[in-house]
Image: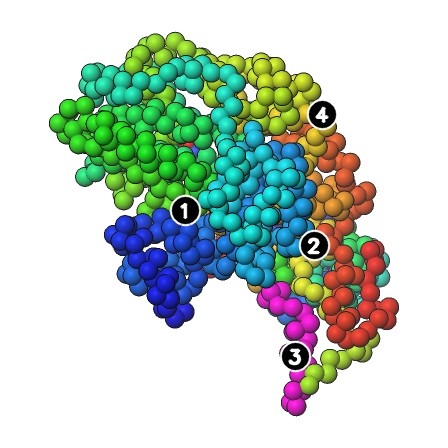
Amino acid sequence: MPTVFVSTELANLIEPILLRHRARPDRLVQILREVQEVADFISDETAAWLAERLRISYAQVKSTRDFYAFFYRENRGRYRILFSDNITDRMAGNQALFEHMLKRLRLEPGKVSDDGLVSVDYTSCTGMCDQGPAILVNNRTITRMTPRRVDEICDLVRGKVPLSQWPAEFFVVEDNIHRADMLLGTPHEPGKAVHAAIARGRDGMLGEMKLSNLRGRGGAGFTTAVKWDACRNANGDTRYIVCNADEGEPGTFKDRVLLQSYAGRVFEGMAIAAYVVGASQGFLYLRGEYLYLLPQLEAYLAGMRSAGLLGRSIGGVAGFDFDIEIHLGAGAYVCGEETALIESLEGKAGRPRVRPPFPVTSGYMGQPTVVNNVETLSKVTEIAIHGGAWYEAIGTKQSTGTKILSVSGDCERPGLYEYAFGVRIAQVLEDCGAQEAIAVQISGASGVCLSEREFGRRIAFEDVPTAGSFMIFGKQRDMFEVARNFSHFFAHESCGFCTPCRVGTSLLKNIMDKIADGRGTQYEMNELLRLQQVLKPGSHCGLGQTAGNAVADTVQKFRPAYERRLAETDFVPAFDLDAALARARELTGRDDAAAHLGEEA
Amino acid sequence: MNAPLTPRKLRVATASLSGCFGCHMSFLDIDERLLELAALVDFDRSPITDIKHCSQRCDVALVEGGVCNAENVHVLRELRANSKMVVALGACAVNGGLPAQRNHLDVGQCLQQVYRTPDGSTAIPNDPELPLLLDKVYPINEIVRVDYFLPGCPPSGDTIWKFMTDLLTGRTPRIEHPLLKFD
Ligand SMILES: Cc1cc2nc3c(=O)[nH]c(=O)nc-3n(C[C@H](O)[C@H](O)[C@H](O)COP(=O)(O)O)c2cc1C
Ligand code: SF4
Ligand code: SF4
């Protein structure tokens, strides 16, 4: 263990943070986030000091710090710039901008400048796919990057201008709502939904939820009323409502818009859930990439408190006490998985738990917990106001209501499109102005890749289910590169808990890179599909189970994109064997024939 | 193991690359079944026969050890070129195993440390007879195409026997529990 020492200056910065969190170890993730904000990074010494102050082991602090991509052990600069690296950012030219910035700042990727001022690196999708390429500077979002904007940012960094003084237009995040239906197109009357729910009573509201047949919008499509009912009936002292705003699935950004412009509905949906199941505490787990939303969300919550929509005896109902607290994530896609999310809320590394028990019986702090997606919760307000029967009439039999799609990629009008369930892919493509699409990736990197022949299929749990991501690829795109980008995403995001996923995602990535290098053969093609057979049944959580989907889909539907890269031999190593002898040649001073290796035997 | 055995003899090559010979010892550990096996296979290039190069095309090459130097590459390539089937025998061949522990070190630093003389200078030999080290120790499937993997350090004699008898009887080799249980 390192020495427990921090400077007085640093201690003075950290003490108020500890005080605010009452030095509670279960707040560790939030504490680390705030410490990093004031200290730029969390050194081993700082970690050891925090461990002592929180009365937990150093290993606990260290393992939590090291788990999250946005926590740094070493100085990464006062300006930490991360380029969003989703395939949509790539298609918008992020790599050239990245190179340009490195050159201007004379930096190596991921390495801090000699003066300790700045570092530039890549990060997973930041949820700005309709207005990319996007970057994060100290976790603050900047959209619509151009070479000019790169230059401006380099000047600001070199001039050491504080982030708070950068031009406001950098930080503009647009909603881009292009098709509004019942959720996005209806004005919000604060309090109306909560009061409507109260008027229906706890049982009455649950009854309406059952009638509505509302299903979760976070991916799995579980029936919301069943979840709530199970939580309500579970044994426990305290019940919790968690809103999952981790939105890490590449290509998804609808929750960001809901929180930016429809927060009232999300929070009222949480309050209604609390009313029905008897919960007293709520959490919004907001992905770290959406830090910019925090002040306005806090302000919104304060407003709800003064309006009597949060706090004690909400709506004058004795015993309806409920409040909401916001926790921030720190750059881990897996924390969108509900049990990993709960671990993170408890201040730990976000590794998925073994299920069962499910969160409804044993969730946050081992207590009954409802975890619902942002969109699911906002739909609850519609059911409270209009009733379940009305709601059930919209959409298809098994997929009631509307669904918001986050449309990005090759189309004229990327943004949000809300449709009644059952809409055909071709209809969406027409509405957003996608002229020559060859493929659509539905539901993100973990979802399904549809080719032109399947554009007649429908968005619905019965046919093509989706968490909302809708990435379009035009005829100029190379679907191999799309799948390769996703394979990198999963290798980076695997939490490492189970071997099939930890090793499998890396092997998948390596093979995709090998094929990209022109060193792949039929052998690698077989290996890709074999790995999928290991990942799917062998992985502990949904991340590993779906990590091979995009590769398997594109191998099946876009095989020529792979085959034109294959070498026509039996096998080629992934690397240059002769180059692998170079270091030993240098040290021995040898250059004889035996000190070299040719390509073939 | 009383499965019907085919009359045609299988031609088998074996080699130890960057390994400890433990996998070969384990092969010998099939004990008296060696006699049964000897009636069914011919050994070609192998430390068992001391034949230095493949004399003809083989059916199976059993390869122990990872690939740590230029000579390992040549041996492995010869086996691949002369065998219908290459089998990675044991953890070193499958993953790099124990020798791959050096992979997180720079090979140059390794050489400097190992050939340090008492007076503190280094004398790294430059004899062409000595195979030159690769930057890392590689599993054999990163150098050539591999058909089967037998994990274990070493795979037990029973595992090797099961594998060989599956081949001899024309079955797809299949190693299952408890032969794949290592703790
Ligand atoms: C790797 C992984 C990532 C996930 N990410 C999210 C996410 O970002 N947002 C979300 O709402 N659900 C996500 N989920 C699904 C959640 O586990 C959970 O099913 C969902 O939040 C339940 O809410 P719902 O019933 O309202 O859909 C993810 C699941 C997995 C396996
Ligand atoms: S499948 Fe991957 S992300 Fe999920 S628990 Fe296993 S290693 Fe972690
Ligand atoms: S796998 Fe084990 S027994 Fe076989 S060569 Fe390697 S170290 Fe030796």
Q: Which residues are magenta?
A: B100-120
Which residue shows up at 45% across the image and 55% down it? Answer: A40
Residue type of the residue flagged with mark 3: Val
Q: Nearer the viewer, residue A589 or A544?
A: A589
Q: Position of residue A476 (x, y in %)?
A: 72, 28
Spatial CA span between label 3 and label 2:
27 Å
Is B94 situated left or right of A502 in this image? right
- Of circles 3 and 1, the one toward us is 1
Mark sitting on residue B65: none
Kindly tell me whether residue A457 is visible in this rendering.
no
The Cα–Cα distance between marks 4 and 2, rounded to whole angstroms, is: 35 Å
Q: Residues within 10 Å of mark 2 (few under 14, many from 20)?
A: some
Q: According to the image, label 2 marks what residue?
A: B142
Total numbered circles = 4
- Place of residue A358 in the rendered image (x, y in percent of width and height, measured from the top left): 33, 37
Query: What's the CA distance linking mark 1 and mark 2?
Result: 33 Å
| Label 1 sits on residue | A350
Residue A475's disc number: 4
